[in-house]
Image (cartoon, helix red, strand yellow):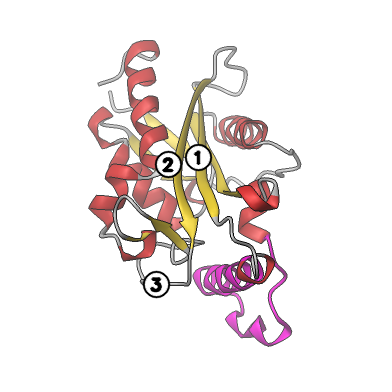
Amino acid sequence: MTLRLVLASNNAHKLAELGALLAPLGIALQAQAALGVSEAPEPHATFIENALAKARHAAMSSGCAAIADDSGLCVDALNGLPGVASAHYAEPAPGDCSAGTDREARRRTQDAANNRKLLNALQGVADRRAHYVCTLVALRAADDPQPLVAVGRWAGVIAPPAGDQGFGYDPLMHMPALSCSVAQLPPDVKNAHSHRAQAAQQMVALMREVWRLG
């Protein structure tokens, strides 16, 4: 029987990325909105606490197994900021309200505001080292006493924007080992190297071992 796994997110990019990365397990991954699950609060200061809270909420609301991703960008010179606040690091400029009710348009507007704020915060700063972090938490049920936890980290440096692939801070995140920004990588290359790919590979191994999948 195919396991139905609820993704505790309505981010279409994350659904596509994680769906591809977890494909070896034969899992039917669904966004929580498809099951009428609301988004959970993310009040915590750490990625793991927020991911666990989101996974529990999705599992409890849907009655299904659930997986949550909490991820972000941590910049060394900013003491780890924007961190867990990465998705809402900046307030969009007043003129950016034209995105209206279209979710993806609002997300693009927010991404642009976040990128502007980060570049402004790093003006005159020589140390541009940063890393993406992804924490995945999976639960068989809301009261699962043994959450599966996987963490991926992807190091790079903040540079002027380049590329139009990806989302979030991808245009600013330059990967020296690949000689380009994350936003210049084809999806298959990104999925082979990213913080989310690293966490997903660990999660696949954990699900095979603990949940006996695949």
76 relative to 175 in the view: left or right: right
Q: Do the residues labelled 3 and 1 touch (CB within 8 Å)?
A: no
* Residue indicated by mark 2: 195
Q: Which of labels 3 and 1 is toward the front?
A: 3
* Residue indicated by mark 3: 162
Alpha carbon separation for disc pair 3 and 1 = 22 Å
18 relative to 114 in the view: left or right: left
Alpha carbon separation for disc pair 2 and 3 = 19 Å
Amino acid type shown at disc 3: Ala
Q: Residue 202 appears in which quarter of the rendering?
A: top left
The reply to whether residue 153 is visible in this rendering is: yes
Query: Residue at 37% of width from left, 45% of height from top?
Result: 194
| Percent position of residue 95, x then y | 68, 87
Q: In this view, does 140 lie above or below 169?
A: above
Q: Is residue 116 covered in magenta?
A: yes
Alpha carbon separation for disc pair 2 and 1 = 6 Å
Residue range of the region highlighted in magenta in the rendering? 89-118
| Mark nearer the N terminus (2 vs 1) | 1
Query: Residue at 61% of width from left, 57% of height from top?
Result: 87
Mark 3, other Cα within 10 Å: few <14 / some 14–19 / many ≥20: some
Q: Which of 111 and 154 is in front in this view?
A: 154
* Local SS, label 2: helix
81 relative to 164 in the view: left or right: right
Amino acid type shown at disc 1: Cys
